[in-house]
Image (cartoon, helix red, strand yellow):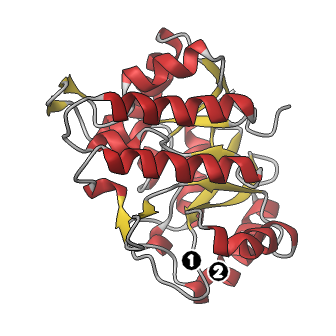
Amino acid sequence: MLTNFHTHTKRCLHAYGTEEDYIKAAVSEGLVMLGFSDHAPFPDYDFGMRMPYSELDDYISTLDILKEKYKNKLKLFRGLEIEYHAKYLDYYHSLLDERGFDYLALGQHIYTTPSGRMDNIFSAGSTEDYLIYAETVCEAIETGLFKFVAHPDVMFINNNEWDDNCEKACELITECAAKNNAILEFNANGIRRNKRLYKDGVRYPYPHISFWQKAKTLGIKVIVGSDCHTPYQVYDEYTKYAVQMADKLGLKRIENIFEE
């Protein structure tokens, strides 16, 4: 059963193609389920490179129309990839309960430093920041509001020495996921970035093998996500390779995030 629950559109300002373009590509690839998870807007703050808040209603209505139009070809789900911050708890509930989203995917890119500054995990200067990031992810998981954690090992895109903080960050996230029966995503977009030389060896920016070995040990449920930003990436060779890689690692891979 071919599925993908991590799909972006041109609405997020750094992807290409309409919702229907992705659906047509998914049908062509033989997918039976497609979840849209464009980068969610916030009503009062622009975290950058995401759907404008003014487009949220059109995003919902467009997906509703397309869900009916393509109901005989594949099953569509309305979702959002979104950052966690405790002050937005009511907003997350309103997206699920009032606006009727099928799921929220935790895509944590932003973390708050002890000084109160918001930083992006893609430019973490120290592995100490990995611990702050991991603690934020754990706090989000414990709310039970997020159907899966997108690219939980994205911090390793940074070229820092592997140390005890790296080990601890992996342990924090994987142990919290195991405790809360959360789903972690094995993200194909890190593979699209290709291998490069890091201080801990030649590897993909993510997925990071050390992280996923811990996930395997704990028996955590894992979903492969394309994280597509163009229609042809919906189930491309990198996504297929991610599936093979996850299986080779012996991860507990699932295909439907809504299965109990």
Quadrant containing the N terminus in the rendered view: top right
Quadrant containing the C terminus in the rendered view: top right
- Closer to the chain start, of discs 2 and 1, is 1
Give the camera-side residue of 115 and 33.
115
Give the camera-side residue of 124 and 231.
124
Q: Are marks 2 and 1 in contact (CB under 8 Å)?
A: yes
Q: Position of residue 203 (x, y in %)?
A: 24, 26
Query: Quick check: 114 left or right of 55?
Result: left
Which three-letter amino acid code belongs to the residue tagged 2?
Leu
Query: Quick check: 138 left or right of 65?
Result: left
What whole-number distance in Å separates the C-alpha atoms at marks 2 and 1? 8 Å
State the count of labels: 2
| Residue at 48% across, 12% down | 249
Confirm whether residue 6 shows in the render.
no
- Tell me the residue that label 1 is attached to: 41
- Tell me the residue that label 2 is attached to: 56
Q: Residues within 10 Å of mark 2 (few under 14, many from 20)?
A: some
Which three-letter amino acid code belongs to the residue tagged 1?
Pro
Query: Quick check: 234 left or right of 99?
Result: left
Query: Quick check: 198 left or right of 145?
Result: left
Q: Quadrant of residue 229?
A: bottom left
Q: Position of residue 42 (x, y in %)?
A: 59, 80
Q: Position of residue 85 (x, y in %)?
A: 59, 67
Q: Is residue 237 above or below residue 209?
A: below
Element marked by disc 1: loop
